[in-house]
Image (cartoon, rainbow, N blue to C red):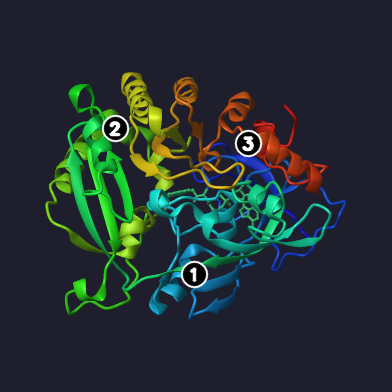
Amino acid sequence: MALLSTSLSGWGRYPVQSCELERPERFALLHPNAEHLIARGQGRSYGDASLNENGRVLLTERVNRLLEFDLEHGVLRAEAGVTLAEILEVIVPKGWFLPVTPGTKFVSLGGCVAADVHGKNHHHEGSFGDHVQSIELILANGKLLHCTPTENQQLFWATVGGMGLTGIIGEVTVKLIPIPSAYMMVKNHSADNLEGLFTLLQSPASDDRYTVAWIDSMASGEHLGRGVAMGGHHVEVEELPGNFYRSIKPERRHSIPFNFPALILNSKSISVFNSRYFKREGGRRHPFLSGYDSYFYPLDRIAHWNRLYGKRGFVQYQCVIPDATAFEGVKHLLEALSSSRRPSFLAVLKRLGPQGRGLLSFPMAGYTLALDLPIRDSGLFVLLNKLDEIVLQHGGRVYLAKDARLSSQKFREMYPLYAEWLKIKHEFDPQNRFSSSLSRRLKIGESA
Ligand SMILES: Cc1cc2nc3c(=O)[nH]c(=O)nc-3n(C[C@H](O)[C@H](O)[C@H](O)COP(=O)(O)OP(=O)(O)OC[C@H]3O[C@@H](n4cnc5c(N)ncnc54)[C@H](O)[C@@H]3O)c2cc1C
């Protein structure tokens, strides 16, 4: 198999590393003695999860067939390289939707299982792995194993959220949800400070099937944490005006053609944008209709938006803090951010439901905060280390699918089920064949 050596990064464009790419048309069963490798779907994880510096990266993009779609029960079996965008095109016109979706549809099915992604409905419906009926996993010994929540279950739950380190996911069978239309009914509620925003996220009156809050990361003092909670649900056909159809046309996409000078996104420009956004979105008093695309995937309308952060790239810092300490924890994080005078273009707060069964899965019952921070100098990493301390002090953890710089020691403190996961890793991959830049940085696969 010809390998192509190239510079590669995740969505945050940091770090950039030299990797050997392989792009098979179908997954061959592995040769038992082949070298170390990691699978890569659409490279939408932000950091180094799908990188393998000076090693092999197996691209799954050509292994992307839809294999079986049970229209009556909404069960889909597909190869792991298929994207959510490709799946949606087929299932939405038939009245089905993904049970869980991240904030972009340009991710692969395999990537959704490997990161056990969560969506705006996590507090009601759990994470992606909760809806997966089975996977076909290509193991380190070259064999193929069928895994379900009840058959080879330990390996199944080590793979859900296992960041590709237990094997290559070849196929996924997932249970879809029925939808009455392709539209969403959305209602915004604004809050003048963090306390108000937490109240909105907890209150059944402002919560919906899908809920997420945008935070004005530049607000401080009495307005620290002000933001807009946005709730939505799939619209019943009766709620639709007569000229709406079940399906919608794809929206026009724009593109960022080159790397922006990083300074365009500065404190002043972000403050101005945030104030306007708060006024506009927070001021929408009535529920409004939105196509599912603009509701779930607003950023997908701008191709290569990651170039906005400049050549050095950016880090998305996403953490979760458990319910009991969430308010204090998030407040400390926002205070640390505000006093660092480093602007975060995007800040999102979401309530998460109970921890799932994936041993290395990110979600736990609490609140997750995500911040997009451009890399201008090494001072950013000093700030992020400080944020890690705050997260740990409040019993939380950082999301591996977004991470590019956590330490191995902090990883172990944040993921208490790691020892259990490691036993399964040792059993099925004793030579640590599946390894990535992320796993080596965090010493995942090594004993304490
Ligand atoms: C704009 C944007 C919004 C996002 N919103 C959310 C969100 O709301 N919630 C959320 O949870 N995440 C979110 N993410 C993160 C994203 O959903 C995850 O990182 C997801 O894993 C990316 O899928 P991918 O196909 O690009 O995987 P990659 O980035 O290519 O890989 C991610 C991990 O999956 C593994 N992997 C991929 N394919 C396979 C396979 N076939 N077999 C084994 N392992 C495999 C890789 O080894 C790697 O460890 C967002 C990302 C972006 C860019």
* In the depicted structure, whether residue 254 falls above or below residue 439: below
Disc ID at residue 417: 3
* In the depicted structure, whether residue 203 falls above or below residue 80: above
Discs 1, 3 touching: Cβ within 8 Å? no
**Image coords of residue 338 (percent x, y):** 31, 23
Give the residue type at disc 2.
Ser
Secondary structure under the numbered disc 3 in the rendered image? loop
Disc ID at residue 87: 1
**Image coords of residue 75 (percent x, y):** 53, 72
The residue singled out by tag 2 in the image is 217
Secondary structure under the numbered disc 1 in the rendered image? helix
- On the rendered structure, is 30 left or right of 267? right
For the N terminus, which image quadrant?
A: bottom right
Q: Earlier in the sequence, mark 1 or mark 3?
A: 1
| Residue beneath the point at 36% across and 53% down | 299
Secondary structure under the numbered disc 2 in the rendered image? loop
| Residue beneath the point at 32% across and 47% down | 212
